Amino acid sequence: QVQLVESGGGLVQAGGSLRLSCAASGAAFSRYVMGWFRQTPGKEREFVAHIRWNGAVTYYADSVKGRFTISRDNTKNTVYLQMNSLKPEDTAVYYCAARQYYSGSYNQHDYDYWGQGTQVTVSS
């Protein structure tokens, strides 16, 4: 079992930056691929980024490529999402997720554990 807690969300103006954190507890964090997803009301949860266990491989949705960076610190059991050049369309609840597999996935149904989410609001 893995418990995930996100933090770092908030209100920011367009063009600004935020860094989300996701702290994990429970089973060995380094065994998991970690992902970030986001969701707005009435829409499906959308893939944002994922990172393999050692941080060597990352993958991003086209909508955030070049603006967002996913990273992890296995000594702190934490995964991060650095979000720069934020746009109003980035407004959503952001979730981190853990997948007990060696490779990542953009499909939310491939993830085993989820955090409660953190709200990010970007004003224009």
Image (cartoon, helix red, strand yellow):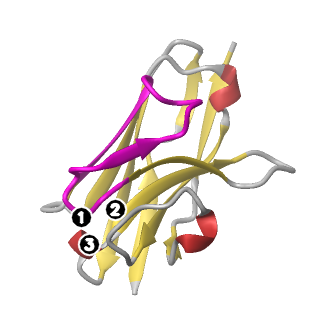
Q: Position of residue 59 (x, y in %)?
A: 41, 45
Which residue is disc 2 drawn over?
Answer: 23
Residue occupying the far right of the picture: 42
Which amino acid, mark 2? Ala
Task: Looking at the image, tell me whether mark 2 or mark 1 is earlier in sequence order.
Answer: 2
Task: Looking at the image, tell me whether mark 3 or mark 2 is earlier in sequence order.
Answer: 2
Q: What's the mark number on residue 77?
A: 1
Would residue 122 be counted in the magenta stretch? no
Would residue 52 be counted in the magenta stretch? yes
Task: Name the quarter where the N terminus is drawn.
Answer: bottom left
Q: Position of residue 70 (x, y in %)?
A: 35, 42
Per the image, label 3 sits on a secondary structure element best described as: helix
Position of 42 relative to 12 (above/below): below
Question: In this orientation, which residue lies closer to the viewer: 18 or 87?
Answer: 87
Position of 9 relative to 86 (above/below): below
* Residue at point 49%, 16% (across, down): 85
* Residue at point 54%, 21% (across, down): 86
Residue occupying the far bottom of the picture: 1
Label 3 vs label 2: CA separation? 10 Å
Which picture quadrant has residue 8?
A: top left
Q: Residues within 10 Å of mark 2 (few under 14, many from 20)?
A: some
Task: Name the quarter where the C terminus is drawn.
Answer: top right
Question: In this orientation, which residue lies closer to the viewer: 50 or 88?
Answer: 50
Label 1 vs label 3: CA separation? 6 Å
Q: Are marks 1 and 3 in contact (CB under 8 Å)?
A: yes
The magenta region covers 51-72
Q: Residues within 10 Å of mark 3 (few under 14, many from 20)?
A: many
User: From the viewer's perspective, is 65 left or right of 82?
Assistant: right
